[in-house]
Image: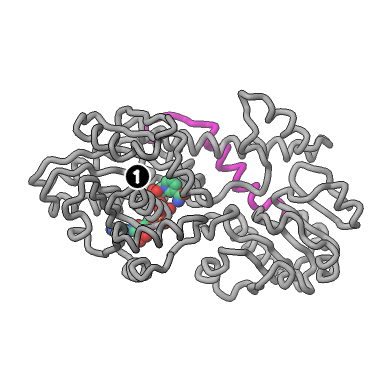
Amino acid sequence: MKIAVVGTGYVGLVTGTCFAETGNTVTCIDIDASKVESLSKGKMTIYEPGLDVLFERNRKENRLLFTTNLAEGIKDAEVIFLALPTPPGEDGSADLKYILGVANELGKILDHYAVIIDKSTVPVGTSEKVHAAVAANAKVDFDVVSNPEFLREGVAVDDFMKPDRVVIGTNSERAKVIMEKLYAPLVRQGNPVIFMDERSAEMTKYAANAFLAMKITFMNEIANLCEKAGADVDNVRRGIGTDSRIGKRFLFPGIGYGGSCFPKDVQALGKTATEYGYDFKILKSVMLVNDKQKTKLIPRVKEYFGGELKGKTIALWGLAFKPHTDDIREAPALYNIKALRRAGAKVVVFDPEATANVRKEIGKKVKYAKSPYEAVEGADALMIMTEWPEFRTPDFEKLSAALNNKVIFDGRNLYDLTEMRTLGYDYYSIGREDIV
Ligand code: NAD
């Protein structure tokens, strides 16, 4: 099949590369010329484990091409994916200007039947808007299909190549046949391709993300209550996770969810609810709790230093919003950096993959260390923001030799309380007893 992917970011590049891997010829289109130039030369623009190998193979086989030119990119394409940004607009609703802008262009240049696929996360009713925007100028037949993406950054290739399920919203039989053919190689183990109407498909994506954000937030609230009530959230987590109705995953408390999806999608779903006159109370609480949770450790850091952070140096391990990605969008670490600097502290940071992105965003506001141990050298405290595997079993002797005080504020509950007590650390985590 000949495929076009418009928007070559985290979702677009994974989508394009994986469909090239199943034998299709894919052209990825992006408005960002430097991105297209890098990718054309074989240079990856994102960090995503395993993607580089597939990218290189398919590029060399000429099955994966890049261009800034929409008309050239969609030439003869049977399907055209829209993997464009849908950031929050001023009022919190998803901004559709990228999607509708491209849809408008497509209408002018489309010269053959194609299935236009919304892969971006878009509110209910968007496929109708896309249809109208294309139809305004189109001279040929086309279908618009909603096909939300459920991949997780960090394991995106696996998620894409072996999806738990594929959701496709369409009422067109012609589009359905093409979509079935497209996804057949990815669901050979029998995972379902679930067909439904466009509106339900659009809602499914928001419902999934809002549910997961709610699950994390619920556990964070339990953790906050555990701290007050003298219970240990780790025990509670193990106690409830074995119930198959609840499940073990997404029960780890911490300093809140971030990333490019959960915050904006919860907000956008809330906005959709408001538009339809529905008071979606849980969503409001999820947002409020998560906002507070992100900087939950800051008051404890302040208290530890007698209410004064001026002149203190705080080391941060982890900048990415989660491990195995370089994505820093809405990362809790950024909120903590801001709060620490506002309180007068100096901040030294280390992250295995996300440093370059943070440097682009906040420049010299913090010091960048080349290793976790360089970050803590002469620092007054260590804060842990992201659960990168390499932080899980540090050399505690080296760590205490480097730190001015043996104190760790752990936003991801990486360490065992008994071990921290034995090692003589002051240790603050989430939903568990403070070790002081
Ligand atoms: P991204 O910002 O990484 O990528 C979007 C790309 O679109 C950028 O490269 C940008 O330059 C390009 N672009 C913007 N305007 C363009 C135009 N007019 N023509 C061509 N290219 C243009 O975003 P992303 O993380 O890939 O997310 C894309 C969509 O997928 C969003 O709706 C998001 O909510 C959804 N989504 C993201 C994830 C994820 O984990 N990142 C998962 C599922 C769904």
Q: Magenta segment range?
A: 273-297
Looking at the image, residue 306 sits to the left or right of residue 320; the answer is right
Task: Indicate the position of residue 36 as horizontal and vertical percent values.
Answer: 33, 66
View extreme (left): residue: 139
Residue that appears at 68% across and 70% down: 371
Looking at the image, residue 303 sits to the left or right of residue 353; the answer is right
Which of these two is toward me, 277 or 218?
218
Task: Indicate the position of residue 205 as horizontal and vertical percent values.
Answer: 42, 37
Which of these two is toward me, 435 or 415?
415
Name above or below for residue 229 compared with residue 102.
above
The residue beneath circle 1 is: 119
- Mark 1: few, some, or many residues within 10 Å (few <14, many ≥20)? many
Q: Is any part of residue 188 visible from this angle?
A: yes
State the predominant SS element of the stretch in magenta: helix
Q: Is mark 1 within 8 Å of ligand 1?
A: yes
Name above or below for residue 73 compared with residue 309.
above
Which of these two is toward me, 302 or 420?
420
Q: Magenta stretch: residue 274 in it?
A: yes
Secondary-structure class at tag 1: loop
Residue that appears at 46% across and 61% down: 46
Looking at the image, residue 2 sits to the left or right of residue 281; the answer is left
Name above or below for residue 374 compared with residue 331.
below
Name above or below for residue 22 compared with residue 396.
above
- What amino acid type should be assigned to the residue bearing mark 1? Lys
